[in-house]
Structure formats: C-alpha cells, structure tokens
Amino acid sequence: MNMLRIFTTGIIKENPTLKLVLGMCPALAVTTTAKNGVGMGIAATFVLLGSNVVISLLRKFIPGKVRIPAFITIIAGFVTVVQLLLKAYLPSLDRELGIFIPLIVVNCIILARAEIFASNNPVHYSVMDGLGMGLGFTFALFTIGSVREFFGNGTWFGITLTKNLFSPAIIMILPPGGFLAFGFIMAIMNKLTNYGIRNKTCATCDLECANAGKKEAAS
Amino acid sequence: MREIIVIIMGAILVENFVLSKFLGICPFLGISKKLGNAVGMSGAVVFVMTAASAVTWLINDLLLLKYNLDYLQTVAFILVIASLVQFVEIILKKFVPPLYKALGIYLPLITTNCAVLGAVLLNMEREYTFGRAVLFGFGGGLGFTLALILFAGIREKLENCNVPHAFRGLPISLIAAALVSVAFFGFQGLF
C-alpha cells in the first residue's frame, strides 16, 4: 500500500513538471512532438531510477559535506550510459534531442529526488519514487508534446488529424509556442485542482505564489 | 573585429539562450521577480559561463581528445563547472569582497543552471576554436542577462495586474515569456 502511494504521488499529486515546476528546460525544448516528449521522458526516467537506486544504496557511505558533488557524479555516469545507448540503438531520436540528453545531468528533478528522497529512504521505496516521478515527468512531456504537435503541425505521433479542419499554427512548434502551451496547461491544471477545494488552496501548497498578500491588500 | 561582433550579437539576439534555446529556464522564472536579484544572478552567470567555456575547451582539447576519452565529456564538464563555481566563490570572497557580497548567494545555484553546461556542450558540438568558444560563452551570458532583466521588468508590472484566478503566478508569466520570445523571433536570420 505504502509502496503504491509513493508511486502515485509522483504521477499526480506531486507531478514534478506540472505541480512542482522542476525540469522546465527539457519540458519546453524537446516537446515539439509527442514522440520526442515521450523519448525524453523515458531517458530521464532511466537516469532517475538508476541514480535513485545507487544513491539510496550508498546513502550511509556518502559524507554529508560532499553529497551534492557525489550525487552529480553518479547522475552524470547514468547520463553517459543513456547517451551511449541512444547513439547506438536510436540514432534518430538522439539527433532530435541533441544536447538535451547530456543536459539531463542538470535536470533539477533528478538532483531534487536524490536530495529529498533517495538519500533518506531504503532502496525499494527509492525505486518506486524514481519510477513514479519519472512517469509523471514523461506524462507531462507527453501532454505538452501532444498539444504542441496537434496545434502546430496538425499531427499526433506523426498521424495527420486535421487535414480539412484548420491549417496548423506553426508558432506552436516554434520556441514561443512552448511557453504558450505550458502556460495554458498549467492554468487548466490550476483550474481543475482548485475546483471544489478553493478554500484551502494556499494551505496545501508551500510554493511561493502570486496570491500571497493579495487578500490583505484587497480587503 | 566584424567576426567578433557577429558571434556576440548572434548569441545575444538570434540564439538567445533563454528565449529561443530554452536553456536556463529555472533561474529565468525563479529569480526574475525582482530587478535587483536578476542583475546579481546574471552577473554571476556571465562570469561563470565565460570562464567555463575557456576551461572546458582546454580540458577537452588537451586531455579528453588526446587520450580518446571523449565519452567522459559529460562527467568531466559538469565536474569542471562545479569546481569552477567553488573556485570563483573562494577567489571572490578573498580578493573582491564587494563583488562577492553582490553575487555570493547566486553562485552555488549556477552549478545546476543548464545554460552554463548548455553553452559548453554547444561549443563542443560545433567544434568552435578557443577564441570563438570564449566569445560564444560570453555572448550567451549577455543574452541570458538581457532576457532576465527584460523579463524582471515585465513581471514587476504583472504583479499589479488583475489576472484571472487560474492564471495567477507562473501561468501568466509563461504567457508573457511567450510574447517576449515572439519579439526575439524577429531577430531570426539577422546574420
């Protein structure tokens, strides 16, 4: 039960991209198509799973003072593995994702999970956390990628959907479209999650938000 | 001289790191709430990015390529950047205390700023010469500065706007960023 809860937390309640707003760079840069989004998500999930397992196993041996450099080295090792695997087996995806594969090293989700979760929890929990967070990230990238591909190119996973409906707005697959799509998806998420629990929105989230101090000023 | 200007202006306007390459979005959205913080952060980024471009180019050329270790690039570069940030912090603390006071708290954040590692990786991918790499790092840092400062100004204005409830906070900032990005799109094909 507990394991299952850890797994689902990452996908919905604490979705790293849509809720915690971590790992924004790949979420905006590679999501021009749904396929690239999923590819990036799976690569990051692999690194997250590997680094969570290794860091969790070594958590009693890594001295507190040098833990961040140690974590980064472990993560960089797994990123190199992914880089070489992609180059060998999926060269076309590797070309599409470009420098964002090595940039998984500085993806804040992975370092954040290492620091918050894997360095304090036993291996089996860390595996579930890595899988859940990774799938949550993949899901977010898939959503953004689908929206951008549909509106920007009229296709979904390369299948043409809007032949006679409307002519695609190319801006959605250009850089401005990334910001635009993500902004609207986050607003929709806000709208959906606030629905019904409007009164306690600020008590449940510990992030800084623009609402803070607004109510006093208005009253 | 002309070539120098083309590289720097290209990195600032045409290939702006934040707005057209999506590198360094986290500090772009995180630190751009106050103009003062934005200036401090971007100062530190320009400094580290220029230095990192120079050091990693030398390490890549003199060590990794020479001994066929180029599969270690990712590991080597991130360690170089992390130690460079530490080194810069110590030097500034010892010799230029006023600058350290201004940039101090932003320096540790730079290690995980993907703009720095991104610039370094792009230098390698495009096989720039030493001079070009350093200029590209410097120009990229300036581009980051321009985006951050522009956006900090917009966000200070946004604070006072009456925005629909669901859009408050990050969503409206992202849409504002989209509009700034459209503006920068006009520079495409400048050179």
Image (spheres, coloured by chain):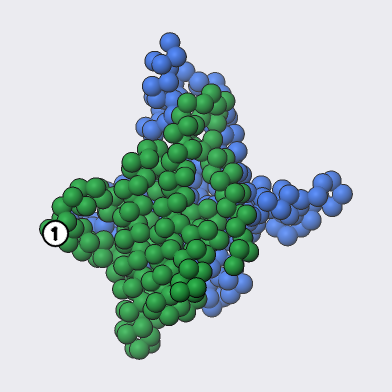
Chain colours: A blue, B green
Residue drawn at x 43%, y 80% as measured from the top left:
B129
Residue lying furthest top: A219
Residue A157 or residue A163, whichever sits in front: A163
Mark 1: which amino acid?
Phe
Binning the other alpha carbons within 10 Å of mark 1 as few (below 14), some (14 to 19) or many (20 upward) gives few
Height in image: A68 above or below A2? below
Residue B168 or residue B176, whichever sits in front: B176
Q: Specify whether residue A85 is in view.
A: no
Q: Position of residue B60 (x, y in %)?
A: 36, 80
Height in image: B135 above or below A13? below
Quarter assignment of residue B135: bottom left
Query: In what element is the residue under mark 1?
Result: helix
Residue drawn at x 46%, y 66% as measured from the top left:
B8
Q: Position of residue B109 (x, y in %)?
A: 31, 52
Residue drawn at x 37%, y 45% as measured from the top left:
B38
Height in image: A184 above or below A157? above
Residue drawn at x 42%, y 58% as measured from the top left:
B142
Instruction: Count up the numbered dots.
Output: 1
Q: Position of residue A207 (x, y in %)?
A: 39, 34
Residue lying furthest right: A164
Q: Taking B61 as reference, is A173 left or right?
A: right
Residue lying furthest left: B94
Q: Taking A142 as reference, is A24 left or right?
A: left
Image quarter hosting the N terminus of chain B: bottom left
Q: Taking B127 as reference, is B72 left or right?
A: left
Residue placed under numbered mark 1 in the picture: B95
